[in-house]
Structures are given as C-alpha cells and as structure tokens.
Image (spheres, rainbow, N blue to C red):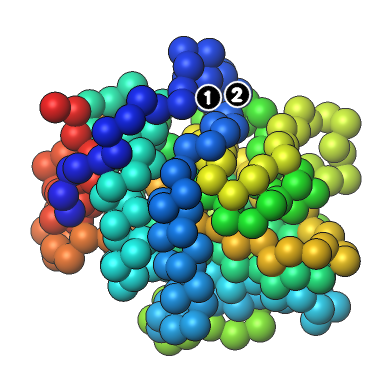
Amino acid sequence: MATTAALRPLPVSDKDIAAYRRDGAVLIKNLLSRDELALLEAGIEQGREKPSAMYSRYQGSTGSGETIIDQLPSKRSPMLHRLLEESPVAELAARMMGTASAQLVLDQIFYKEAGEVVPTPWHQDTPFLNVRGNDLARIWLPCDPSPRDVAIQVVRGSHLWNVIYSTSATTSVEPSTVVKADEGDGFTYDGVGGDDLPPVPDIDAFSDSFDILSWDTEPGDAVVFHGNILHGARGLTGHPHRRRALAVLFGGPQLRYHIPAGHGMPLPGDGEAGSVPEGAPICEHPELFPVTWREN
Ligand SMILES: O=C(O)CCC(=O)C(=O)O
C-alpha cells in the first residue's frame, strides 16, 4: 500500500491526543473532506451489495433488525483502498499512538438498516486480534448522522485495565441482545476469544459503576478509540437513518504479532504468517500488516 496521505493539517489538538491516551477515545470532528466521505459511502455500499465470504449477519434477539459485518473490505473495494491511502485516517492513528508509522491491522464494515437498529454488545477487539500491545488505534467512521443512541460508546479508561475479556457467548454474564443469523463460509466468529478468559462485566445492568463516553456523530467525523478498550453501540427503534460505519484498526511498529488460540481475524496483507514467531514486531512484517502511513 502506498504511503501518500492528504496534504492538509489534521484537525487534531494536543488536548485531543491527551484525551485519547487518558480516556481511550476521542471524537474528531470533520476529519474527512466531502470527496473522502463520498469514497467512504460508495465503498460501504459496494461492500453491502457484494458481501465477501467473510460476512456475518446478526439480528436482535427477537429476530428484528440486522447488522452486517464484513471483514477487510478495503482489500476488495478500490474506493475504500483509496480512502485509506489518501485520506488522513492512517496519519490520525499514528498521531494518536505517537508513532512514526501506521500499519493496517483490520478494517470492517458495520452496516445497520434504518428502523430497528440492532445494538453492538459490549466487547473488546483484543481477543479477536493477531496482535498484542499498546500501539493500537481504531478509527470509527460513520457515513450517516449517528447520534449517541446508535454511535460507538466506550467505557472510559478501560484500555488501561490490563484485562482481556472473553467474547464467547457461552461465558457471557447476560443472554446476548443479538444473535447470529447467518455468515459466509470464509470466516466465523465462533471459536475466537477463548472460553478461559473472564466474561465482559454486565455494563448495562451496572451502568452507574462505569464511566461511559458517547458522542453525537455526523458523516465525516471520526471516533478514535484504543484497540484494547471496552466498547459497543446501543440499539434504537424507529431510527430514521441507516447506521453505516467503516472501522479501521492500525498498529504502530512495535505492536507484536500474536498467534491466537483457535483462530483470529483474517490478516490484511497477502503474505504467509506460517513462520512468523509469536511476539515479532509488526514493523518486520509489512507483508502481513501493510504500512499505510509513514512520517516523511
Ligand atoms: O459500529 C458498531 O456498532 C460497532 C463497531 C465496533 O465494535 C468496532 O469498531 O470495533
């Protein structure tokens, strides 16, 4: 992947960077230009029309609404590929992490239809990943007006708890608010995470005990959150817009390759992971984690 990016100042202050590091998440207004937003929307729609074999479809536990999640759409969509190469998204991740480069770890579409917006249960991305470490920034890019009722929300500071929670339905403390309806044959969430990890706390039942951060977001905004933070999205009935978002995870050079128990997420690069040892810094493996931005 090339390392060109938009030649304009990032709309990010030192205060934003401090908030990201302290709280684990921050809203950046108006990150994308109008043209970049058009790429985002067209790329997400292209992904929705032609899902890959790695899609999963979830519904509310009563069978209403749907969320389609698809893996690595930027590998198939020239528009999303261009967005990652040419927009300030990867540079934003590097600035937040304080690193001189940003490598792609994962990108995903979260596509929710209007009307009954299905929640995304509280979870961490960490158990799914083929990497471990602190230099891990997720950029969540909505392309619809997404008020805090449906946008991403996080447990403030939970990126610093040094716990990896299980994502497995069998270890959940609560019956899930969503159920898997179907999935392609190229990837399954079944078996990622591991049953030996502690369950995610019941954050909704004890919401007074957690400091939850959420934002009203508009197309072109970005929520940047730490890759290890607890996060999710609320559900809503009667929502007038679709709730479409691309979420892109970047790693810094010292992030470490991790061989997950069971299986992890698909890798963004075209290289073979076979002989890469546990703990290798990802800067040594751009064939698995393509360099998307590098400081000149
Ligand atoms: O968009 C959503 O509802 C969830 C996004 C998410 O979980 C993520 O970006 O990791």
Q: From the image, tell me which residue sits under label 1.
A: 20
Is residue 1 among the parts visible in the rendering?
yes
Residue located 53% across and 13% down the image: 15
Q: Residue at x 58, y 29 (%)?
A: 26
| In the image, residue 50 above or below residue 259 | below
Q: Give the residue type at disc 1.
A: Tyr
Disc 1 element: helix
Residue 125 locus on image (x, y percent): 51, 50
x, y percent for residue 132: 36, 41
- Please give the residue where the numbered disc 2 appears in the rendered image: 23
Rounded to the nearest angstrom, the CA distance separating label 2 from label 1 is 5 Å
Most foreground residue, 28 or 25 = 28
Q: Residue at x 54, y 45 (%)?
A: 220
Q: Amino acid at mark 2?
A: Asp
Q: Is residue 194 visible?
A: no
Q: Residue at x 72, y 40 (%)?
A: 216
